[in-house]
Image (cartoon, rainbow, N blue to C red):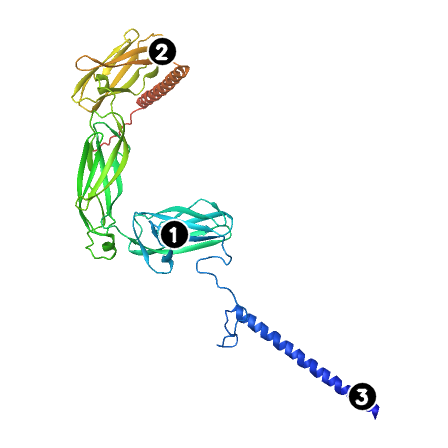
């Protein structure tokens, strides 16, 4: 009996142990499952995996400030920001916008505090949303030390063609290789009340003009202001020469009116003038001159000026007769063979103010050849040209070599306008020429011989035909 009791007790203890082990295993599995659910809830932002209920987040995270871009504490702090001399540090949370005009250069003063040492800090100001790129300015890299204050200046240029009446964000950022702190401010960019811009000035000729010749200019203007502009006066001048000319552009509407289609289609916010002509004085000295474009608007109370440079080709002294007659030879050197001639062509330009008659004399030809000028004389109108032709023929038996002679051009008063030395190289007939002549003669002889043979055959045939007896016609006798 005792043995059975011990055996039965052992069995009972074994069952209790197994039951306890099973319960503990189930508890461990439950705890593990619950921990996994909590981790999954944290990963999915606190949303329940089983329905619409939200499980509690067990771990607590620190939320970063709205200004710092990194979770670590930066080694510097933006202490104060001044825009156009006004302290706007507190404007980040107030929602007020800063008004800025187009075309303005915006001065920005930034005050920085150092909380630790940093060796590569940069300050940057920038605006996005401009169609042709980001508007920005930044400082060179500088060193920041703990406990020191720094004052840096930036300048942001607001373009004249940026969209107006819109709000933009101006970002002020301090950063190094690991940290970054940024503030943002709202800017309201407005048009100026009156603002006419000179978009372009086109000069013709564009860079060089001769004294005494006209200079043409076309000016394109555009209205970038808030008011319609009328009677816009455009003036082109060269102050150093005392010459100027003006023209009016009647009316330019605003860009805003054009975009909202509140104005008749034919009216525009930009226009180009007709060609404005400046006559350059004949006595203008050669050099570079400033061409000034002046646009007056707002009933003459506003003005915009722009300057371009042009080179004037003047004359250093009073022009002489030689300066007013230009002689040009196609070639001053020719080559020919004995028995053949040479031709020289030249043109004469009369740059004076009256018509002139020119003649050409050839000196140094009569001893070895003959010459002829065609035409012998010619009248040339002012600012016109005329062509002459010189014919030179070496005499038979002239020695080969280079012959030099002179062409003298004279006006109708007998004054020498120009003298030019001309060269003619005379060569003996080449072997090729002789061979060519020989071949021509041989061919002609063969052709003549063939003709003679054909004529002889024709005569022979006719003679043979004459010896044949004539055919008699037998008559008939009628009774």
Q: Quadrant of the C terminus?
A: top left
Q: Secondary structure at mark 2?
A: strand
Comes first in the chain, label 2 or label 3: 3
Taking depth in this image into account, of 34 and 337 the one nearest to the observer is: 34
Q: Is the residue under label 3 in contact with that under label 2 (CB below 8 Å)?
A: no
The picture places residue 162, in percent across and down from the top left corner, at 31, 51
102 up-or-down from 451: above or below: below
Horizontal side of 429 relative to 204 (left or right) equals: right
Report the residue that reaches farthest toward the bottom: 1
The picture places residue 154, in percent across and down from the top left corner, at 38, 46
Disc number lying in front (2 or 3): 3
* Residue pointed to by mark 1: 81
The picture places residue 139, in percent across and down from the top left corner, at 43, 45
Badge 3: how crowded within 10 Å, few (<14), some, or many (20+)?
few
Disc number lying in front (1 or 2): 1
Taking depth in this image into account, of 334 and 317 the one nearest to the observer is: 317
* Residue pointed to by mark 2: 402
Badge 2: how crowded within 10 Å, few (<14), some, or many (20+)?
few
Q: Secondary structure at mark 3?
A: helix
The picture places residue 155, in percent across and down from the top left corner, at 36, 46
Q: Quadrant of the N terminus?
A: bottom right
Q: Which mark is residue 7?
A: 3
Report the residue that reaches farthest toward the top: 367
Taking depth in this image into account, of 128 and 83 the one nearest to the observer is: 83
């Amino acid at each position: 009996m005792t043995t059975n009791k011990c055996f039965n007790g052992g069995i009972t203890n074994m069952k209790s142990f197994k039951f306890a082990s099973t319960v503990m295993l189930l508890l461990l599995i439950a705890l593990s499952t619950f921990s996994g659910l909590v981790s999954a809830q944290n990963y999915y932002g606190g949303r329940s995996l089983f329905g619409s209920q939200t499980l509690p987040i067990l771990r607590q995270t620190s939320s970063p400030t709205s200004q710092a871009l990194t979770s670590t504490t930066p080694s510097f702090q933006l202490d104060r920001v001044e825009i156009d001399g006004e302290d706007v540090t507190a404007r980040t949370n107030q929602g007020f916008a800063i008004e800025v005009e187009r075309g303005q250069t915006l001065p920005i003063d930034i005050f920085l505090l150092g909380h630790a040492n940093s060796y590569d800090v940069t300050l940057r100001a920038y605006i996005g949303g401009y169609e042709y790129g980001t508007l920005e300015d930044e400082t060179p890299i500088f060193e920041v030390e703990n406990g020191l204050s720094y004052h840096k200046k930036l300048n942001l240029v607001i373009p004249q063609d940026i969209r107006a009446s819109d709000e933009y964000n101006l970002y002020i950022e301090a950063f190094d290789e690991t940290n970054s702190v940024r503030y943002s401010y709202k800017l309201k960019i407005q048009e100026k009340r009156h603002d006419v811009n000179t978009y372009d000035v086109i000069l013709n000729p564009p860079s060089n003009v001769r004294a005494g010749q006209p200079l043409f200019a076309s000016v394109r203007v555009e209205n970038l202001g808030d008011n319609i502009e009328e009677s816009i006066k455009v003036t082109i001048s060269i102050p150093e020469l005392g010459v100027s000319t003006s023209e009016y552009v009647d009316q330019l509407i605003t860009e805003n009116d054009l975009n909202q289609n509140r104005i008749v289609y034919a009216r525009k916010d930009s226009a180009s003038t007709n060609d404005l002509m400046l006559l350059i004085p004949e006595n203008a000295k050669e050099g570079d001159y400033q061409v000034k474009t002046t646009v007056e608007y707002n009933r003459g109370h506003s003005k915009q000026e722009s300057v371009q440079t042009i080179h004037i080709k003047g004359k250093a002294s009073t022009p002489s007769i030689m300066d007013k007659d230009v002689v040009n030879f196609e070639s001053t050197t020719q080559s020919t063979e004995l028995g053949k001639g040479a031709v020289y062509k030249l043109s004469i330009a009369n740059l004076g103010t009256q018509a002139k008659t020119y003649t050409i004399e050839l000196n140094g030809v009569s001893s070895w050849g003959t010459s002829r000028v065609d035409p012998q004389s010619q009248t040339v109108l002012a600012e016109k040209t005329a062509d002459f032709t010189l014919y030179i023929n070496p005499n038979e038996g002239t020695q080969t070599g280079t012959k030099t002679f002179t062409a003298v051009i004279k006006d109708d008063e007998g004054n020498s306008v120009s003298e030019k030395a001309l060269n003619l190289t005379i060569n003996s007939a080449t072997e090729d020429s002789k061979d060519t002549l020989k071949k021509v003669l041989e061919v002609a002889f063969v052709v003549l011989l063939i003709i003679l043979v054909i004529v002889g055959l024709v005569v022979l045939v006719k003679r043979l035909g004459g010896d044949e007896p004539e055919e008699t016609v037998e008559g008939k006798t009628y009774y």
